[in-house]
Amino acid sequence: MLTLAKIKKANPKDRPYKVFDQRGLYLLVNPTGSKLWRFKYRYQGKEKLLALGMWPEVGLEDARRMHQRARDQLRAGIDPMTQRAALRHPKPDHFSTVAEEWRNTHRDRWSPSHAARTERILDKDLLPWLKDRPIGAITAPELLQVLRRIEARGAIETAHRARRIAAQIFKHAIATGRASWNPANDLQGILKPKPRTRHHPAITDPRELGGLLRAIDGYRGDPITRLALQLLPHTLVRPGELRRANWDEFNLEAAEWRIPAHRMKQRRPHIVPLSRQAVAILKELRPLTEGHPFAFPGMRSPSRPISENTLTGALRRLGYSADRATAHGFRSTGSTLLHEQGWPHTWIERQLAHMERSTVAAAYNHSEYLAQRRIMLQWWSDYLDALRAGEPPPPKPGTEIGPG
């Protein structure tokens, strides 16, 4: 495989020659000194050559990303050269043109995971069959046939997502005068029903929860993993929000954790009050990971956060099976037990960063119930300590505080 050093050492010769990377990707070195990225592949039995740019304008990692994208297109039955030509000279009313406009309009507002999922469905499930069709001529039966292909491989949830994506693209086409109706809307209720949502297993028996907390305290693996599992129940955040946390989000003096909007599921910033116990866990963590990009860096690659599989694997090694406890299940545990103890539903829902259904509630909720949640989470941490020690729960303070 190529490295930057090998590329720099590839000096010109009397004749052009190739320096290979992998899977058809190579660098063509010309006598003039130019170094050109090329991808040699076969499509429908014919050998083809795709130009990917010139080094160093196109670096090694960029060339590999372009090479992988072309290979993904080949696996989806798309000729990368034809696809490139279509994008360079698209017809203004073709599905591919409108889809690309829609994608470019909304991409900046998507989370990384949502962007990856949306673009995968668009590039592999919709464009291969619809890209060259005038968008105003696509009928509901034609779109249904495309969605049935997704259903046929058992990807029912993906088929429903693809219908919603198509509906947004047709909506864009109608707004820009290239279609007069939205066939995706006519397919509501036609696809196979989505499988029932699987809820994350959660321990809601206080005595059993105390046992889990003691087991986590005794975890003998990586201390960063132990501290992540210890912090999760005190904050009730999603595992992904904890795993990707940066140290500059924490203010231990103010006992607050401010998670930016781009890392939240609902794309709204979230403030997590930190109990004394949560602050103590973070102070134990800080000497281990301060200076890394993430507060909880991975063991093998500190430039990446700890993985959810690491947290799940730790629970398995502690003897908790997948149908008994998960990292995400601490949220359900907290919600259930806090509700049972009589804490206000609105405080709990805001701590869980759930979107309000009522626009009135959402407008009122701008205050975030921060003062109330601080009281509630401190009691919750004290309650967890009591369960861990096998002691009675702490007295519950009043909940008559007004909006915070």
Image (tube, grey):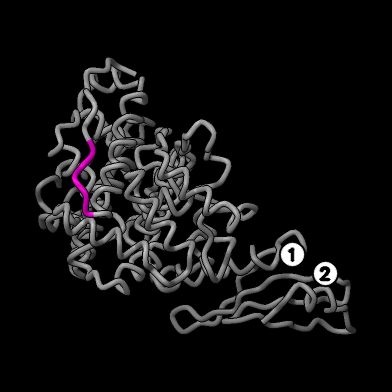
Residue 342 percent location from the top left of the image = 14, 32
Looking at the rendered structure, the kind of residue marked 1 is Met
Residue 105 percent location from the top left of the image = 46, 37
Q: Which mark is residue 353?
A: none
Q: Residue at x 37, y 53 (%)?
A: 239
Q: Earlier in the sequence, mark 2 or mark 1?
A: 2
**Residue 49 picture quarter:** bottom right
Q: Residue at x 30, y 16 (%)?
A: 403
The furthest residue to the top: 402
Residue 164 percent location from the top left of the image = 26, 46
Q: What is the spatial separation of the Cα atoms under label 2 and label 1, in whole angstroms?
A: 7 Å
Left or right of residue 148: residue 252:
right
Which portion, as a residue range, is magenta?
390-394
Query: Along the line of sight, which residue is nearer the eye, 213 or 14?
Result: 213
Split into 4 quadrants, where in the image is the C terminus? top left
Decide: few, some or many residues near mark 1? Use Cα within 10 Å; few <14, some 14-19, many ≥20. Answer: some
In this rendering, does residue 105 appear at all?
Answer: no
